[in-house]
Image: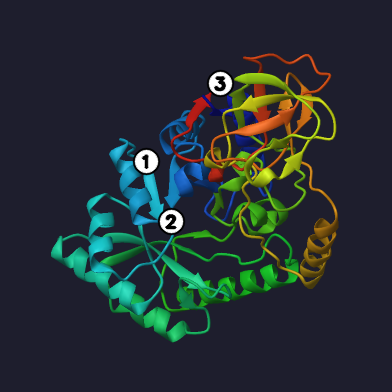
Amino acid sequence: MSKLVIEKKDLQHNIKKIKEHAKVNGENDSGEDVKIIAVIKANAYGLDMKQYVQFLIDNGISFFAVSTVEEAVKFRKLGFKEKLLMLSSTSVKEDVEKLVENNVILSVGSKEAMTIASEIAKANNKKLKVHLKIDTGFGRYGFMYYNREEIVESIKNNDNLEIDGTFTHFSNAFYDDKYTKMQFDRFIDCIEVLKMNDINPGMLHVCNSSAFIKFPEMHLNAVRVGSAFLGRLSFQNNLGLKKIAKLESKVVEVKEIKKGEYIGYSNGYKTKKKIKIAVIPCGYIEGFNLKTGRDLFRTVDKIRNLVTEIKNLFKKQRIYVEIKGKNCEVLGRIGTYHVIADITNKDIEIGDKVELSINPTLVDSIVERKYI
């Protein structure tokens, strides 16, 4: 009965704002507009890959990126022919073969990844386009920025690979401007080394959603935008992006409960007076009140989080849903499939619409995604 609702006008608004911001620096060095690469990992951030990608295509986006082999294969199985980049470097032969088979641009971030890609290119009698990934301080995928000789040698020893692009990924663009700028400088230094060795680095892209908004001078040839399309960022944005996606359900039962009765699992709530409640058929399975792991980047954030946790031990945390435009407090523990809300003294009936604030990435795949 519950569904994740995405308002097209809000998504169109975000697309427009992002396109406008991509032109902040005008044209790049090649004389072309900055390219927008739409990141569609995690089932398009929970918005349903099929509907979301088609909507972006209809609104002028033609280049996409994924994080896993499974996502890449799904993209092609859905019938999309657009340009697709695999962001993660892999040296697993079976994975590389599957990506090549599905016409996915590989990311190569190690000598091993280069060698495997080169061998498969040779076996298929073709020259593969790849994007070179450089680790400028994330500590994950990519050639380490200081191993420049290794990068140059790997490229020159695999001449059946064409460097279509070169990129890095910022680890802390949300908060740490100084470190982000240092990563950027490391990347530019690597690009200069490639050029000095007569290697064309191709399309250059470093910005994720946060860096894209905060550092227009780093847009280069392309930007990778994911969460910004959803208007869900880890900092206050100045683009006027709208948060998209909300969970909708309906009231299925209404009843009165006298004073002194328990509500929900573990008898977590006891009524202090006679109340009226609404039963709503959604819960954890739909992603309601679920949270991802906290990303604590700065010492001040860690201290703030610790203080908050201590305070929460001594006070009740209140959770609300919206029914007919009215905030209604959730009572007791949230169940897998059900929520109980206090509707005392409110004109609410069976069948009334309920809106719940959620992170769409955490909404179970069984929940319908509806674009309106």
- Residue 48: image location, x then y, percent: 46, 36
Locate the C terminus and report the quarter of the image it occupies. top right
- CA–CA distance in space, label 3 to label 2: 28 Å
Kind of residue sitting beneath label 2: Ser
Kind of residue sitting beneath label 3: Ile
Foreground of the two, 57 or 26: 57
274 is higher (above) or lower (below) than 181: above
The residue that label 2 is drawn on is: 67
Kind of residue sitting beneath label 1: Glu
The residue that label 3 is drawn on is: 372
- Residue 39: image location, x then y, percent: 50, 48
Question: Total marks drawn?
Answer: 3
- CA–CA distance in space, label 2 to label 1: 16 Å
212 is higher (above) or lower (below) than 334: below
Whichever of callouts 1 and 3 sits on the residue coming sooner in the sequence is 1
The local secondary structure at tag 2 comes to loop
